[in-house]
Image (cartoon, rainbow, N blue to C red):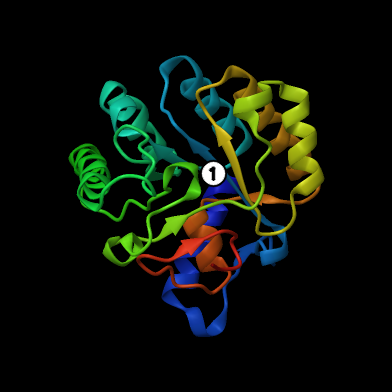
């Protein structure tokens, strides 16, 4: 129900931007204000052993997320990619083999991006699959050739380093604020555990978990190709 409310609100934002957005619930307007929005993002997957359990937990909590998938992993797990979209999540591009775009030649960098984009279109249909450059870095001038919005993050608990559930949870809860984009990796069981605890803790504080695209649009921002967004409040 919570995810359905968000999707309906986003639709209203797109159709009636000049009047704001709201949804009548029991005679009252239910609307996630920008100061109640937050985005969970996951890199490097999907993996059957971890991503499936994460999707189960997000569905139970009515929370949306954004998954930046590696093409090599997506090719092995097409059912998970399709499930992400079916359950209201956003799917994005994290290159084919997690190449460092700031060190790769423009030809290699674009090939890595385009190969994953082609796979996502094959699996999910035509669409705009946003890019998260591995390590958050992209070569000088390459952004001018990127045809989709790009996403970095504002909260990084370095879950790949500690692989400790409680350390990750504490780091995120310490730094999370309205319109934060949180970086996690759905290939680690400890990160999946942490993500679900983070959702529980922040929902209890009134936060709504939305996709990055939803968060930007609910903040009145029209995402632009080649722009790197670090928070839901803008680039």
Residue 123 locus on image (x, y percent): 22, 37
Q: Is residue 52 above or below residue 207?
A: above
| Relative side of 191 to 143, left or right | right
The residue depicted at 20 percent of the width and 45 percent of the height is: 111
The residue closer to the viewer here, 71 or 112, is 112
The quadrant the N terminus occupies is top right
Secondary structure under badge 1?
A: loop
Q: What residue is pinned by disc 1?
A: 64
Residue 86 x/y as whole percent: 37, 38
Write the residue at 31% across / 29% down: 74
Give percent across and percent down for residue 102.
39, 49
Badge count? 1
Q: Is residue 209 above or below residue 201?
A: below
Residue 190, compared with residue 22, is above or below; it is: above
Q: Is residue 177 above or below residue 81?
A: below
Q: Which x, y percent locates residue 225?
A: 35, 66
Query: The C terminus lies in which quarter of the figure?
Result: bottom right
User: Which quadrant holds residue 93?
Assistant: top left
> In percent of the image, x 56 and y 54: which residue is there?
5
Q: Is residue 204 left or right of residue 215?
A: right
Closest to the observer, 48 or 170: 170
Binning the other alpha carbons within 10 Å of mark 1 as few (below 14), some (14 to 19) or many (20 upward) gives many
Quadrant location of residue 80? top left
Q: Which residue is at the far bottom?
A: 18
Of residues 45 and 51, the one nearer the viewer is 45
Residue shown at 18% from the left, 39% from the top: 122
């Amino acid at each position: 129900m919570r995810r359905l409310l968000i999707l309906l609100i986003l639709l209203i934002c797109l159709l009636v931007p000049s009047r704001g957005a709201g949804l009548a619930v029991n005679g009252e307007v239910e609307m996630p204000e920008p100061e109640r929005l937050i985005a969970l993002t996951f890199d490097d997957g999907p993996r059957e052993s971890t991503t499936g359990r994460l999707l189960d937990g997000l569905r139970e909590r009515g929370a949306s997320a954004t998954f930046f998938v590696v093409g090599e992993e997506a090719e092995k797990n097409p059912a998970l990619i399709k499930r992400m979209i079916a359950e209201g999540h956003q799917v994005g591009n994290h290159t084919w083999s997690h190449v460092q775009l700031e060190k790769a030649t423009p030809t290699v960098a674009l090939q890595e991006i385009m190969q994953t984009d082609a796979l996502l279109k094959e699996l999910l249909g035509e669409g705009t699959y946003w890019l998260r450059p591995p390590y958050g870095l992209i070569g000088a001038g390459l952004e001018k050739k990127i045809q989709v919005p790009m996403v970095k993050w504002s909260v990084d608990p370095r879950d790949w380093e500690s692989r400790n559930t409680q350390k990750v949870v504490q780091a995120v809860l310490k730094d999370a604020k309205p319109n934060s984009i949180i970086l996690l990796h759905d290939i680690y069981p400890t990160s999946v555990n942490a993500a679900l605890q983070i959702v529980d803790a922040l929902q209890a504080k009134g936060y709504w978990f939305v996709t990055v695209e939803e968060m930007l649009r609910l903040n009145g921002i029209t995402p632009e190709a080649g722009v790197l967004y670090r928070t839901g409040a803008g680039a």
